[in-house]
Amino acid sequence: MDMKASDSSRGLPVDGKALKNRRMRLGLTQEAAAKLAGYSDRVIRKLERGGPVLMETLDNVVEAYNGKDPVVALPASAYLFVQPDTDLEAFCRRWFDGVYNQRDLAIIDEMMAEDVQIDSEGEVRHGRDTIRNRVSHVLSAFNPLTITVESIITQGNTFAVNWSVRKKHVGEFLGLAATGRWIEVKGTSQATVQNGQIVSVRDHWDIDNCLRQISGDSSRPV
């Protein structure tokens, strides 16, 4: 692959510390990261110093990192240097505890933008009502339900969270009638917050594993 042209002094400031942490979590040296993204290591060093760099450069490097580890992928915009308008860790914990553990659906109106975009398992939908309907369905199907935030990464106005949930199946869920079985599932969520509300969110969790636990059949096709 030909090395892409390096950036001039034009460009945008970036969160160099976050980019360095991302690279190191991938186990890459600056030289290896440069080769992966198709740039010189000088560009990687410039990114990790905070730029400025062109948005195209940031897009390409972040895309390369996300391709190597898509589970914790964040958009390139999450690495732009911005002053967060919200304490994202506290915000994240309040969302999961309030909405799921406390079953307070009023928090959805407070913390979700009306036209929020939701990407769950490759299906993209829009609107606060979509979130409310999904949460209501989960809470009616599982009680008690306890969700635990395992870890949180924040960058700019974006957070990524690993969570686990333990819940009892007491109502219809995805076509399966109540079984009374206890279910344990892990997942990840990534969200962008603007003006104190979530404007986009992407969720990933092991649906197949959940359905196998509900059915009690580890060989059940799903």
Image (spheres, grey):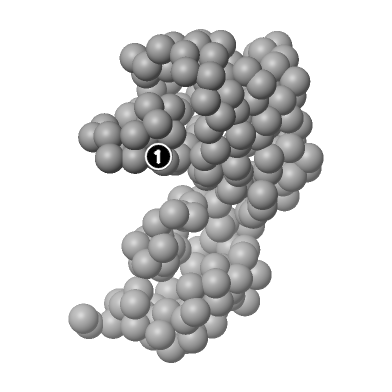
* The one of 164 and 18 positioned closer to us in this rendering: 164
Say whether residue 207 is visible: no
Could you say where residue 94 lies in the image, as x and y percent from the top left?
75, 31
The quadrant of the image that shows the N terminus is bottom left
- Location of residue 187 with respect to 147 vertically, above or below: below
* The one of 10 and 94 positioned closer to us in this rendering: 94
- Location of residue 81 with respect to 132 vertically, above or below: below
The quadrant of the image that shows the C terminus is top left
Q: Give the quarter of the image for residue 153.
A: bottom right
Could you say where residue 46 lies in the image, as x and y percent from the top left?
54, 78
Say whether residue 172 is visible: yes
Give the labeled residue for mark 1: 209
| Residue at horizontal 34 percent and vertical 77 percent from the top | 36
| Residue at horizontal 53 percent and vertical 32 percent from the top | 183
Would residue 64 appear left or right of 198 to someone viewing this image?
left
Could you say where residue 118 lies in the image, as x and y percent from the top left?
45, 28
Mark 1 lies on a secondary structure that is helix
